[in-house]
Image (spheres, rainbow, N blue to C red):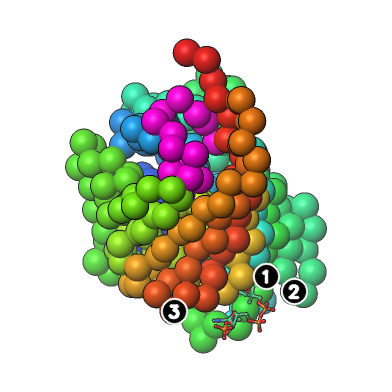
Amino acid sequence: MTTSTSTEFVVSGAEALLRVDPVGLSATSAELSMTAGPWLADPVAGVCRGALGVPLDDVTGYVIASGAPQGKWPVSLGIRVDFLVDPPVDGAAVSITGELVARDERGGATRGSVVDAAGATVALITQRSHLVAVEEQPTSTAATIAAPAPEVTLREALGVQDFGSGVVELAPTPFAANGMGNIHGGILIVGSELAAMSAVDAHGELRTTSIDISYVRPGNAADTTGFRAEVLHRGRSLMVVRVAAANSSGKPCALATVVLRRYES
Ligand SMILES: CC(C)(COP(=O)(O)OP(=O)(O)OC[C@H]1O[C@@H](n2cnc3c(N)ncnc32)[C@H](O)[C@@H]1OP(=O)(O)O)[C@@H](O)C(=O)NCCC(=O)NCCSC(=O)Cc1ccccc1
């Protein structure tokens, strides 16, 4: 894969947290690599599949960024992710690829996937991106953020507080930020997953099978982000949960539908 433009992947807090590394980028396709370690295991969500939202959001969004005109940068407008199997938690690398589906003057549509070392598909994404005006393109911060120690879980690194019944908060942290200082679209997927699991009082026996999320206004990673989940359907094995995320202003920044399934051990 070739890098055909001056746009480069920006490693901000969210990419450092998820151990995401650039592989290749062009205006039509992109590839990232991610180390999938024990920090993805979670006592409530089982394995935090939503964490794959960070590299999936990046790998598709940066295809649009790469072909965007000067002074414009894409923000994620809507993402649909389907999770097929758990990502590894043993430190193996997974490959994340994205490709252009369509582009116009307002943004574009992209799709992508996560594939494990054996070639099995772990997750699929469809994304719609929207171009906003920026004074300058985001760049990697001079002070590179180091990943937390391997024993620090994603839940701990994000300062997640679970108040029960679907009320969850993420602390203000650079680990939640994208290159613009806004809360990363993939971190909003993580928070939505944890809130949905909290709403159904999960203890690791369920898995997230899909998340469909709309980003309705930018969220600020330097502020607390609250998630409130409402159970729409609770069957024996299938659950559908709606989650709203908002900063301390109370205005929603993301609205998600999370589908959970019970897996027999
Ligand atoms: C712009 C639009 C997409 C569409 O909005 P519309 O419905 O047509 O707009 P409407 O005028 O009705 O305003 C609605 C509200 O939006 C606010 N607002 C509007 N425009 C701007 C603006 N330019 N800047 C700031 N705020 C703006 C506006 O004030 C209002 O709020 P208010 O009621 O006053 O409090 C908006 O929904 C949006 O920004 N969504 C969030 C996208 C997002 O954060 N995605 C996830 C992160 S991306 C990611 O992580 C990927 C990545 C990786 C690495 C590196 C980089 C990226």
Judge whether residue 207 is colored magenta: yes
What is the spatial separation of the Cα atoms under label 1 and label 2, in whole angstroms?
A: 6 Å
Kind of residue at disc 2: Arg
CB within 8 Å, label 1 to label 2: yes
Q: Secondary structure at mark 1?
A: strand
Image: magenta residue range:
194-208
What is the spatial separation of the Cα atoms under label 1 and label 3, in whole angstroms?
A: 24 Å
**Residue indicated by mark 3:** 249
Q: Residue at x 64, y 46 (%)?
A: 232
User: Where does residue 89 sit, x and y in percent of width and height?
Assistant: 37, 27
Kind of residue at disc 1: His
Q: Residues within 10 Å of mark 1 (few under 14, many from 20)?
A: many
Depicted 162 relative to depicted 207: above or below:
below
- Where's ligand 1: which quadrant? bottom right
Q: Residues within 10 Å of mark 3 (few under 14, many from 20)?
A: few
Question: In this rendering, would 207 be left or right of 4?
Answer: left
Q: Looking at the image, which is closer to me, 39 or 102?
A: 39
What is the spatial separation of the Cα atoms under label 3 and label 2, in whole angstroms?
A: 28 Å
CB within 8 Å, label 3 to label 2: no
Q: Secondary structure at mark 3?
A: loop
Ligand 1 near label 3 (Cβ, under 8 Å)?
yes
Q: Residue at x 77, y 63 (%)?
A: 103
Q: Looking at the image, which is closer to me, 118 or 48?
A: 48
Depicted 69 relative to depicted 51: above or below:
below
Ligand 1 near label 1 (Cβ, under 8 Å)?
yes
Residue lying farthest top?
Answer: 265
Q: Secondary structure at mark 2?
A: loop
Q: For the N terminus, which image quadrant?
A: top right
Nearest to N terminus: mark 3 or mark 2? 2
**Residue indicated by mark 1:** 130
